[in-house]
Amino acid sequence: MAGAKFDFSGTWTVITGGASGIGLTCAMAVAKAGGNVVVSASRKPEKTQAALAQIQKANPEVQAKAYPCEVGQEASVSSFFAAIAADKVQVDYVIHSAGISPNTEFFDQTQSEWDQVQNTNATGSFLVTKHAALTMRSNPVKGDFRGKILLVTSTNGINSWDPVSAHYDASKAANNLFVRVAAEKLSEDRICINGLAPGWINTDLNATLPPDVREKESAKIWMKRWAEPEEMAQCALHMLTMPYLMGQVIMADGGYR
Ligand SMILES: NC(=O)c1ccc[n+]([C@@H]2O[C@H](COP(=O)([O-])OP(=O)(O)OC[C@H]3O[C@@H](n4cnc5c(N)ncnc54)[C@H](OP(=O)(O)O)[C@@H]3O)[C@@H](O)[C@H]2O)c1
């Protein structure tokens, strides 16, 4: 990874959505920085195996594990963190990157699709934060914190929205406020939480974005290009290692209006 040098040696980072896109590049960046990683398994087993191989290739010296986790179901999230604890892994950092973004014409968005997006993106962020924090509560305090959580939110919850992603935009707005609420509560246990709000990133998530929306959105980016997921990984590692950052959502959107 070009740019900053990070040192995650001797730590474990749990990454949801870590088998693809932004989550996978975060996992590889943590590994390159010497950190061990646990990713939530993809629903496609071959994708999980490929991700683990990529992480190990990034740094053969670190450990990389995967466990199943359906982020919108509390029993699954709870089992995920229980399995990690049973493996005697101390969770130092969590990057919650799992999310979905179906792009559907506004009047074609059904209640079922709306509910699925809220369940994965909004409820998932709550459940992962809750169970990550419950796990981190028994960590010793290192510096100011027992552990740090980074939610991958979106500028779609702030200043970039479109009727085709109304459900997604609402779920991400929920994420952005939730960071603030959770930060106040988790500070009681010396657990840090912040949010990284990416703009437009070249990942599979945007596969269904209608061409006219892609064109309209691209024209608004001051840097005149979309970001690569590796650039979000660099932002994520910065945010996890920045001192005195608490309850903030930082937009990484290349400048946008
Ligand atoms: N790409 C962008 O332009 C962009 C912009 C702003 C914010 N974001 C946010 O960045 C995050 C990562 O997105 P990405 O671009 O990296 O997309 P991606 O490549 O599609 O990755 C999404 C990941 O989330 C996982 N996932 C989806 N639903 C899940 C569920 N219910 N339980 C557990 N895991 C689930 C997927 O697992 P499977 O392999 O099983 O499907 C996949 O690994 C998302 O929260 C997204 O909203 C992305």
Image: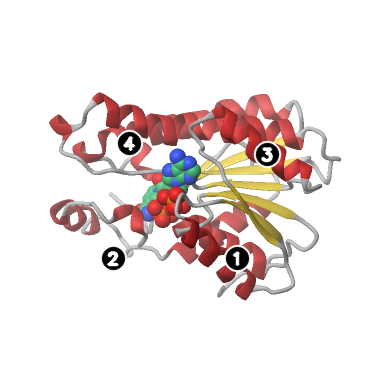
> Disc 2 marks which amino acid?
Lys
Give the residue pinned by disc 2: 224
The mark closer to the camera, 1 or 2, is 1
Residues 189 and 76: in front is 76
Mark 1 vs 3: CB contact within 8 A: no
Q: Residues within 10 Å of mark 1 (few under 14, many from 20)?
A: many
Give the residue pinned by disc 3: 81
Q: Residue at x 49, y 56 (%)?
A: 45
Q: CA distance from mark 4 to mark 2?
A: 22 Å
- Residue 194 in percent (x, y) is at 58, 41
Q: CA distance from mark 1 to mark 2?
A: 25 Å
Q: Residue at x 52, y 63 (%)?
A: 25
Q: Earlier in the sequence, mark 1 or mark 3?
A: 1
Q: Is mark 4 within 8 Å of ligand 1?
A: no
Q: Secondary structure at mark 2?
A: loop
Residues 28 and 82: in front is 82
Give the residue pinned by disc 1: 29
> Disc 1 marks which amino acid?
Ala
Q: Earlier in the sequence, mark 1 or mark 4?
A: 1
Q: Residues within 10 Å of mark 3 (few under 14, many from 20)?
A: many
Q: Earlier in the sequence, mark 1 or mark 2?
A: 1
